[in-house]
Amino acid sequence: MRPLTFAVTIGLAALIALSASARAQNRELTADEVKNYFTQVQRDATELLQRGDVEQIAQWSERHVADDAHFKVSVQAVHESIPKMWSVIDLDKADINRLQILLGQTVIRSIQDYSLRIDVGKVVPHGVDAATVTVTWRDSFKVTPPAPTAPGQAQSTVGQAPQPAAQPRTVDVKRTLECDHESMRLGRS
């Protein structure tokens, strides 16, 4: 779920910056403008996660997420068509910032081969500074969790033959996220 937090942050924030162009021309946001913007978001998110630069991710979020942004995220984990877990998360910008600090460089750098595809479905404009957008996020990546070690357990190698290092286990993750960015009021200039 770690990349999900970043992806949702980017997606919900995306329309905030997008609205400035339409507002300047005093017309409704168009589906093409929304699609073009989400294409840029897809490139930004993919590049930032592939580089694993937590500082750049934080800077991107600061520039693109409104101070009064509010996120409601519903997550359901399914394995072999059987629901295994669900959760509902209610976040604001301060929560997003704390999550970025908590996840940190170690978690972000454990992500390998990240790819993201964002498909914009239905776009319903609500004037010059709001829209309801249905978006499907598809991402995939590999993650290598850190090897578990027992606290305070010293490993003595005196008198022992060298042991081969255990290969870290890599987990393949493929997700499809259906998101409704509902009636988001976008920032005013």
Image (tube, rainbow, N blue to C red):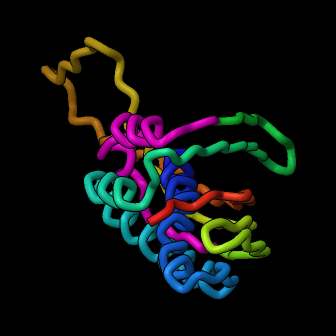
Which residues fall within the magenta stretch?
Answer: 90-118
Looking at this view, name the residue that lies furthest to the top: 152
Residue sitting farthest toward the right: 81
Residue depicted at x 34% and y 38%: 101
Residue ID at (77%, 46%): 79
Left or right, 25 with respect to 49, comes to: right
Q: Is residue 102 visible?
A: yes
From the top left corner, tell me how far across and down residue 107 is, in percent. Answer: 38, 44
Question: Which is nearer the eye, 156 or 121?
Answer: 121
Q: Is residue 116 magenta?
A: yes
In the rendered view, does 107 fall on the left or right side of 137? left
In this rendering, is residue 81 above or below 103? below
Magenta span includes 61: no
How many numbered discs, if any? Answer: 0
| Residue 141 visible in this rendered orientation of the protein | no
Looking at the image, residue 26 lies above or below residue 168:
below
Q: Nearer the viewer, residue 169 or 111?
A: 111
